[in-house]
Image (cartoon, grey):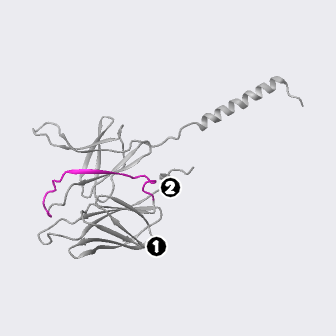
């Protein structure tokens, strides 16, 4: 059956419109969540604040878990502060600056802001008045994937970690990422240097589940009257499960 010229024109118009519409749909950018950051400190800092859209936002900073994810302000400059009572009764509290840090503001980025006191720990029971400093790490599932251990040492002494067959040095104030051993139930060993050379100071069983990642934080034991030069280390652990949706889709 022959087609009329008018029918062919109408058919070509419909096909062209569909192609343009389909091209427009494919060109739509992928919507990414806003950049976020989390806080962690080796000793609890309580509630801190930062400004977002002109309003103070509270973040609780502990030493046993990461803080809840907070939206990064425009430009990526995070200025943390506390509220303290005013000098005169009846006046509103005033801001006390804590520190500021630059984090990634790119959409979808996830950052860990590690806050730590600078210098050796004071004697046990003495108020800690050391100035606070910060370090920034990639907290995304791509930069810190499941199936790995991230260990960080605040100690000024050399530290080494062994888990399964892997034994790695952990430089002071640096992070090291190692893979989980094939055996999901194994032992974690930490050693450091004392007056008698290398000594194992931590030995603990570690169960590692699927789709998990483990953060380890090592710090010196404060000196005391009975142990003025402690050789041991304190170990903080944070175990997280990474959902499949947290990983970027493969192309």
* Residue that lies at the very extreme toward the bottom in this rendered image: 196
Q: Is residue 169 above or below residue 70?
A: below
Q: Is residue 226 above or below residue 137?
A: below
Give the image location of residue 208, x and y in percent.
43, 68
Residue 18 on the magenta span: no
Instruction: State left or right for residue 230 relative to residue 187.
Output: left
Picture residue at 16% right of the left edge, 66% below the top: 223
- Give the magenta-colored segment's residue range: 123-145
Give the image location of residue 80, x and y in percent.
26, 44
Residue 18 marker? none
Give whichever of 144, 44 is nearer the camera: 144
Q: Quadrant of the N terminus?
A: top right
* Residue that lies at the very extreme toward the left in this rendered image: 88
Q: Count residues near mark 2 (Cα–Cα under 10 Å), then give few for <14, some for 14-19, many for 20+.
A: few
Tally the numbered discs. Answer: 2
Picture residue at 73% right of the left edge, 31% below the top: 15
Residue at numbered disc 1: 183
Q: Main secondary structure of the magenta part?
A: loop
- The secondary structure type at the circle numbered 1 is loop
Residue at numbered disc 2: 244
Q: Is residue 136 above or below residue 27?
A: below
Picture residue at 70% right of the left edge, 30% below the top: 16
Q: Quadrant location of residue 44? A: bottom left
Q: Quadrant location of residue 18? A: top right
Give whichever of 184, 228 is nearer the camera: 228
Give whichever of 81, 119 is nearer the camera: 119
Residue 144 on the magenta span: yes
């Amino acid at each position: 059956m022959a087609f009329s010229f008018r029918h062919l024109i109408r058919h070509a118009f419909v096909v062209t419109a569909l192609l343009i519409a389909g091209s427009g749909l494919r060109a739509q950018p992928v919507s990414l969540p806003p950049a976020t950051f989390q806080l962690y400190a080796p000793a609890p800092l309580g509630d801190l604040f930062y400004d977002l859209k002109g309003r103070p936002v509270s973040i609780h900073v502990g030493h046993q878990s990461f803080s809840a994810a907070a939206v990064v302000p425009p430009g990526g400059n995070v200025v943390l502060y506390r509220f303290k009572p005013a000098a005169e009764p009846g006046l509103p509290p005033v801001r006390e600056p804590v520190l500021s840090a630059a984090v990634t503001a790119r959409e979808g980025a996830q950052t860990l802001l590690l806050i730590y006191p600078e210098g050796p720990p004071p004697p046990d029971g003495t108020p800690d008045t050391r100035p606070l400093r910060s370090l920034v790490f990639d907290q995304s599932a791509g930069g810190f994937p499941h199936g790995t251990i991230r260990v960080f040492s605040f100690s000024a002494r050399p530290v080494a970690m062994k888990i399964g067959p892997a034994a790695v040095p952990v430089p002071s104030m640096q992070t090291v990422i190692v893979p989980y051993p094939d055996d999901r139930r194994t032992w974690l060993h930490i050693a450091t240097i004392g007056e008698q050379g290398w000594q194992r100071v931590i030995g603990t069983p570690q169960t590692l589940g699927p789709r998990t990642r483990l953060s380890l934080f090592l710090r010196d034991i404060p000196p005391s009257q009975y142990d003025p030069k402690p050789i041991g280390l304190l170990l903080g652990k944070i175990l997280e499960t990474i959902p499949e949706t947290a990983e970027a889709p493969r192309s």
